[in-house]
Image (cartoon, rainbow, N blue to C red):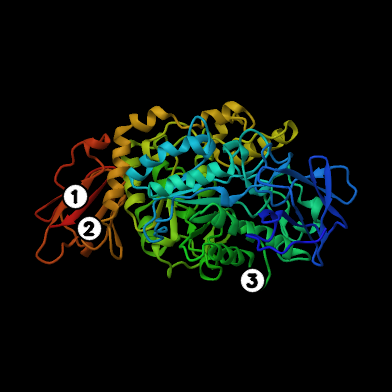
């Protein structure tokens, strides 16, 4: 078949052109590749670099297809399939991304310096677990003050439910949540409410079931590196240009075809690459090019806290696990497993507000090695902080929310610190209304794989001595009931008025917390962060009386005084009235509370 000249959106996949549908894929290990549509087998032309390409004149959007490789009787889905209507083991379907009529022409782009992020899992965000069902709830998120949604991975995966991190078809949004245009409608609706959308993408491994990449090229994988989740992906060895194309073009596809405002890159410490241009830099470059001048936000999870991802690879931000770990110790008092090297003290929070990560190369006893890299030069906005996320809730054994693990006062104080602090804050779905539903680990694998996954999950959680009393009695990941327990309760969305008011008022107040932040310790469990003309005082312990205050950050601006602006102990949030905080130079800091003082 002769190739027809066309300008493709992306380098691989099935794309609609004037003359039909143009198919292109990388399969260097094969001599012959054909596309199979219905009962027709249509040969594709081999290109010099191992790609195969051809156009089928009567194919169109909705056409289902698979590939035949050499004389193999088995047919395989497209590695760059835009949709798998029956899951990863079924047919691929041609999708026309240009068919959707967007209404976001006036979208102003995300403001990367004033983000409030909301992590969500589409399958549990509503009872229905679909893109369309999520849309009616978007306005409430914006009303609270959220402006960026971070959607957990939607790469196609096998089974009826899962977190999404075992995806096998990078380019196909899971059929479990709707069709690709339903995802586009979700993004369109979010923007109409003033919400940007970024997607959590997994480029560090593929899931153990339903991945057919090895059938096309053995060079997709390498044993050069160790990976905690399976085979390492080959980004720098023989054949790596085709692998790098699959991933970097995928990043560009999400930005281009779904109008996303950025990406969250999962577990980047397991993306190994010795190439002159690291694949993460390539991903960032391709994604920004696909944005065609729009501002996008690229954030990474990186366990070693390597700032090279920002400084050298061009990402915008990193997750700050140090902040979470210190907050958990402050909330619960438990220093165990990967919380061992944290104390939850005021010093830690003051240091993180001013200097970024806590560990910037010091010895870290849990790993028996140095941890972190210097982050003193980063803006606080470049580190995303949180008290809850999908991993950390699930890692609490019974997957309890933070308010179920600590006292109400301490919970409100830590929430204030998170939402008023200088870092970019992130909430996990339901946190804004105090969801009581857990977020357990769930994955619908085949029985043999499910047994192995469940065993691994139990062994992981048993690193926490406080969970040993459960004696392995953890919710089975493969059980549908485990999944259903995690769905948010609509009654709580409107019923928990005090929690909603807390988050809404804090995010409104956040706009007033401007300027360079300075911090100081005030007592064993109390500290202050000073902004331009605002003080954020957090006391995680008993009531504190300061009769003398040899701390310059508590001095008011010239010829002005401090007055109480906000308190986490307001009855509006379920607290008690706050007595005068500052009287004739003496200070009384309420127990387990956060307060904001303004200069008047």
Per the model, the C-alpha gap separating discs 3 and 2 is: 44 Å
Side (left or right) of 254 relative to 118: right
Give the quarter of the figure containing the N terminus: bottom right
Q: List the residue tagged with mark 1.
A: 565
Q: Looking at the image, is 440 positioned above or below residue 510? A: above
- Judged from the image, the secondary structure of the residue bearing numbered disc 1 is strand
Determine the residue positioned at 9% across, 54% down. Answer: 584
Task: Tally the marks.
Answer: 3
- Judged from the image, the secondary structure of the residue bearing numbered disc 3 is loop
Q: Looking at the image, is 475 positioned above or below residue 594? A: above
Q: Looking at the image, is 161 positioned above or below residue 207? A: above
Q: Where is residue 378 drawn, in percent x and y?
A: 43, 67
Marks 3, 2: nearer the viewer: 3
Quick check: can you spot residue 368?
A: no
Marks 3, 1: nearer the viewer: 3
Per the model, the C-alpha gap separating discs 1 and 2 is: 9 Å
Q: List the residue tagged with mark 2.
A: 534
Estimate how packed mark 2 is, as few (under 14), some (14 to 19) or many (20 or more) residues with alpha carbons within 10 Å: many
Q: Are marks 1 and 2 in contact (CB under 8 Å)?
A: yes
Q: Earlier in the sequence, mark 3 or mark 2?
A: 3
Q: Are marks 3 and 2 in contact (CB under 8 Å)?
A: no
Compare residues 591 and 508 and report the one nearer the observer: 508
Q: List the residue tagged with mark 3.
A: 277
Estimate how packed mark 3 is, as few (under 14), some (14 to 19) or many (20 or more) residues with alpha carbons within 10 Å: few
Q: Which of marks 1 and 2 is nearer the N terminus?
A: 2
């Amino acid at each position: 078949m002769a190739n027809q000249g066309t300008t493709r959106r992306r380098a691989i996949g099935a794309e609609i052109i004037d003359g039909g549908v143009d198919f292109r894929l990388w399969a260097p290990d094969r001599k012959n590749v054909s596309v199979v549509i219905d009962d027709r087998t249509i040969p594709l032309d081999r290109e010099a670099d191992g790609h195969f390409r051809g156009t089928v004149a009567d194919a169109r959007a909705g056409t289902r297809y698979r590939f035949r490789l050499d004389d193999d009787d088995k047919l395989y889905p497209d590695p760059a399939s835009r949709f798998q209507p029956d899951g990863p083991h079924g047919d691929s379907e041609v999708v026309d991304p240009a068919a959707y009529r967007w209404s976001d022409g006036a979208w102003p782009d995300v403001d990367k310096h004033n983000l409030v992020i909301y992590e969500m899992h589409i399958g549990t965000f509503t009872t229905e677990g679909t893109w369309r069902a999520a849309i009616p709830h978007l306005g409430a998120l914006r009303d609270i003050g959220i402006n960026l949604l971070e959607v957990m991975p939607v790469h196609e995966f096998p089974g009826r439910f899962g977190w999404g991190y075992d995806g096998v078809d990078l380019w196909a949004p899971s059929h479990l949540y709707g069709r690709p245009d339903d995802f586009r409608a979700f993004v369109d609706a979010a923007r109409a409410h003033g919400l940007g959308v970024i997607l959590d993408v997994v480029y560090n491994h593929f899931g153990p079931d339903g991945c057919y990449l090895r059938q096309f090229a053995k060079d997709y994988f390498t044993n050069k590196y160790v990976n905690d989740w399976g085979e390492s992906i080959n980004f720098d060895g023989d054949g790596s240009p085709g692998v790098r194309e699959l991933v970097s073009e995928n990043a560009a596809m999400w930005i281009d075809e779904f109008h996303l405002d950025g990406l969250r890159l999962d577990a980047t410490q397991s993306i190994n690459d010795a190439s002159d241009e690291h694949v993460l830099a390539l991903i960032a470059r391709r994604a920004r090019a696909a944005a065609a001048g729009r501002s996008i936000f690229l954030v990474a999870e990186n366990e070693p806290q390597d700032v090279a991802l920002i400084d050298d690879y061009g990402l915008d931000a990193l997750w700050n696990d140090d902040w979470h770990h210190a907050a958990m110790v402050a909330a619960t008092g438990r220093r165990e497993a990967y919380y061992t090297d944290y104390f939850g003290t005021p010093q830690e929070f003051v240091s993180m507000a001013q200097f970024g990560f806590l560990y910037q190369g010091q010895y870290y006893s849990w790993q028996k090695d140095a941890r972190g890299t210097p982050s003193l030069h980063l803006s606080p906005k470049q580190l995303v902080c949180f008290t809850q996320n999908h991993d950390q809730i699930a890692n609490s054994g019974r997957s309890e929310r933070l308010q179920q693990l600590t006292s109400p006062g301490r919970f409100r104080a830590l929430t204030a610190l998170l939402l008023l602090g200088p870092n970019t804050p992130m909430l996990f779905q339901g946190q804004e209304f105090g969801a009581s539903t857990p977020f357990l680990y769930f994955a619908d694998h085949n029985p043999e794989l499910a047994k192995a996954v469940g065993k691994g999950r139990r062994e992981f959680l048993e690193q926490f001595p406080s969970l040993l009393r459960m004696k392995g009695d953890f919710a089975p990941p493969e059980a549908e009931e485990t999944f259903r327990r995690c769905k948010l309760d609509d009654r709580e969305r409107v019923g928990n008025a005090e929690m909603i008011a807390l988050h809404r008022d804090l995010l409104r107040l956040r706009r007033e917390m401007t300027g360079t932040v300075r911090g100081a310790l005030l007592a064993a469990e109390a500290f202050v962060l000073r902004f331009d003309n605002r003080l954020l005082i957090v006391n995680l312990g008993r009531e504190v009386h300061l009769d003398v205050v040899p701390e310059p950050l508590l001095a008011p601006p010239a010829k002005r005084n401090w007055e109480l602006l906000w308190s986490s102990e307001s009855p509006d949030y379920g607290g008690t009235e706050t007595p005068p905080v500052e009287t004739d130079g003496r200070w009384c800091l309420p127990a387990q509370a956060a307060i904001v003082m303004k200069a008047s």
